[in-house]
Image (spheres, rainbow, N blue to C red):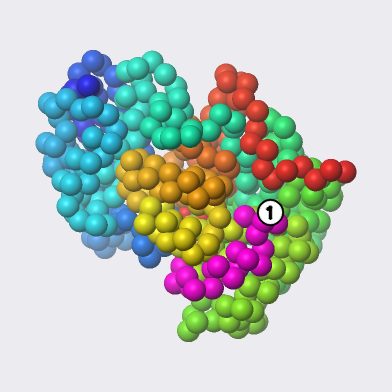
């Protein structure tokens, strides 16, 4: 049992300069945990409710004073001065206290900040690293470190929609996080050179730090990624692989996917993804179809799995019921886990358990709006097969990579074997 002595919130700014929430939980034993929450741009319709002030005269309505007031008011009243058995106990009190399905009363941002700050304080009071504490909250925690999936090129909502798909990622196949990051640096520099040469453009960065030149087409975006790998002196399929987050919910209108100049129905979109998977050796495809196109996801899965993992992000929203539905209909075989889509660690653990029971891959993911907090690295070490943080630029991303380097040095764990290295 731990006794909570105080719970306080405050407004801070995220990597896009927008307000977000930080919570501090203090136990009577003196242990303290801080946590700040991220925020997405390409959000799923089924995500938990991020409470914003809506006052247009301040931060264009994006202020988080109401969420902070939830923490300092009703959440503190619920938690302070009581003894708590653990994370699920506290999360249950937060869920019940809010009382709405989408957490719109207190705000999922307020609730999640407290949920994670409580976990941090609990780890500190038991004298274990956060990843070890988070591992104790789930069945089948991971004993190998998560494989890095690193944003190289950005499009879609993260880069002004110059091309439909949101991310082209590289997946270095080296045997340590240290080596994977060094490889990613070489590819990123080669991609920046290519951006200058091919597009006469400055290598400007999108929300997650990826490069975003004015690609003439989606195929060009993927082809440029393959070229950057080659000019870094590396071989696709041997040294590293490519992956994509299509984020297709955000370019489907009137039942058709708008890709470059084409208007594709679901079958044609699946054909297009199958061709990309073949031509560029993609090892995972996230949100290849829209969140409302449930009926075609099984066909996508039959077409590209097991060559590529079929990951659901907007489709699943880290929601156990949606993961179970997708597992039953064989609509996906990978979960993108973003805790702020659901709002507490316990509910995210439930979604993970459903994905794990179905034999899926689990990718623990950052959001496009992040902070310098690094809890995501610990979460990915405990719960994930992969981690998706964005690019290897910008401090809000590097905080997570640097924490992974620290955990690698301390634990000397090997890296997850996915995707299996192609024999040369
Ligand atoms: P978001 O994007 O944080 O803007 O939702 C990340 C993703 O789609 O994976
Ligand atoms: Zn996504």
Residue 126: % across, % down: 35, 17
The one nearer the camera, 162 or 413, is 413
Location of the N terminus by quadrant is top left
The one nearer the camera, 214 or 33, is 33
Location of the C terminus by quadrant is top right
Asked if residue 119 lies left or right of residue 363, the reply is: left
Residue pictured at 79% horizontal, 49% vertical = 237
Residue pictured at 52% horizontal, 63% vertical = 331
Residue 274, compared with residue 399, is above or below; it is below
Residue 397 seen in this snapshot:
no
Residue span colored magenta: 291-309
The one nearer the camera, 311 or 18, is 311
Asked if residue 232 lies left or right of residue 2, the reply is: right
For residue 293: magenta? yes
Asked if residue 402 lies left or right of residue 371, the reply is: right
Residue 332: % across, % down: 54, 59
Residue pictured at 34% horizontal, 45% vertical = 347
Among the 4 quarters of the image, the one containing residue 324: bottom left
Name the element at disc 1: loop
- Label 1 sits on residue: 283
Residue 377, compared with residue 194, is above or below; it is above
Q: Residues within 10 Å of mark 1 (few under 14, many from 20)?
A: many
Residue 313: % across, % down: 48, 57
Residue pictured at 25% horizontal, 16% vertical = 30
Asked if residue 367 lies left or right of residue 408, the reply is: left
């Amino acid at each position: 049992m731990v006794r909570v002595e105080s719970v306080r919130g405050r407004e801070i700014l995220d990597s896009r300069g927008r307000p977000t929430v930080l919570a501090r939980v203090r136990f009577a034993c003196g242990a303290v945990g801080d946590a700040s929450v991220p925020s997405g741009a390409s959000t799923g319709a089924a995500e938990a409710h991020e409470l914003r002030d809506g006052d247009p005269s301040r931060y264009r309505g994006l202020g988080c004073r109401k969420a902070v007031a939830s923490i300092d008011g009703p959440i503190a009243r619920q938690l302070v001065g009581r003894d708590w058995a653990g994370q699920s106990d506290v999360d249950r009190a937060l869920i019940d206290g809010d009382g709405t399905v989408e957490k719109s009363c207190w705000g999922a941002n307020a609730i999640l900040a407290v949920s994670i700050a409580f976990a941090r304080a609990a780890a500190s009071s038991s004298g274990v690293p956060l990843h070890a504490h988070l591992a104790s909250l789930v069945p089948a925690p991971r004993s190998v470190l998560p494989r890095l999936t690193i944003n190289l090129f950005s499009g879609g909502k993260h880069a002004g929609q110059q091309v439909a798909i949101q991310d082209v990622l590289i997946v270095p196949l080296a045997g340590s996080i240290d080596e994977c990051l060094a490889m990613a640096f070489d590819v990123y520099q080669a991609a920046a050179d290519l951006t200058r040469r091919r597009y006469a453009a400055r290598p400007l960065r999108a929300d997650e730090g990826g490069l975003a030149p004015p690609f003439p087409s989606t195929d060009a975006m993927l082809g440029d990624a393959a070229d950057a790998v080659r000019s870094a002196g590396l071989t696709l399929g041997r040294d590293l692989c490519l992956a994509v987050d299509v984020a297709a919910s955000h370019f489907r209108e009137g039942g058709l996917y708008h890709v470059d100049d084409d208007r594709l129905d679901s079958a044609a979109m699946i054909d297009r993804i199958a061709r990309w998977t073949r031509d560029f050796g993609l090892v995972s495809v996230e949100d290849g179809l829209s969140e409302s196109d449930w009926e075609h996801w099984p066909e996508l899965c039959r077409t590209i799995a097991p060559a590529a993992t079929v990951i659901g992000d907007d489709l699943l929203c880290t929601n156990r019921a949606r993961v179970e539905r997708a597992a039953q209909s064989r609509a996906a075989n990978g979960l993108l886990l973003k805790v702020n889509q659901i709002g507490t660690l316990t509910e995210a653990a439930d979604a993970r358990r459903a994905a794990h029971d179905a034999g899926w891959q689990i990718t623990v993911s950052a959001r496009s709006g992040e902070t310098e907090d690094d809890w995501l690295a610990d979460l990915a070490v405990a719960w994930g097969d992969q981690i998706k943080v964005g690019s290897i630029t910008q401090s809000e991303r590097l905080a997570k990579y640097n924490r992974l380097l620290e955990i690698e040095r301390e634990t000397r764990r090997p890296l997850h074997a996915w995707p299996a290295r192609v024999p040369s």
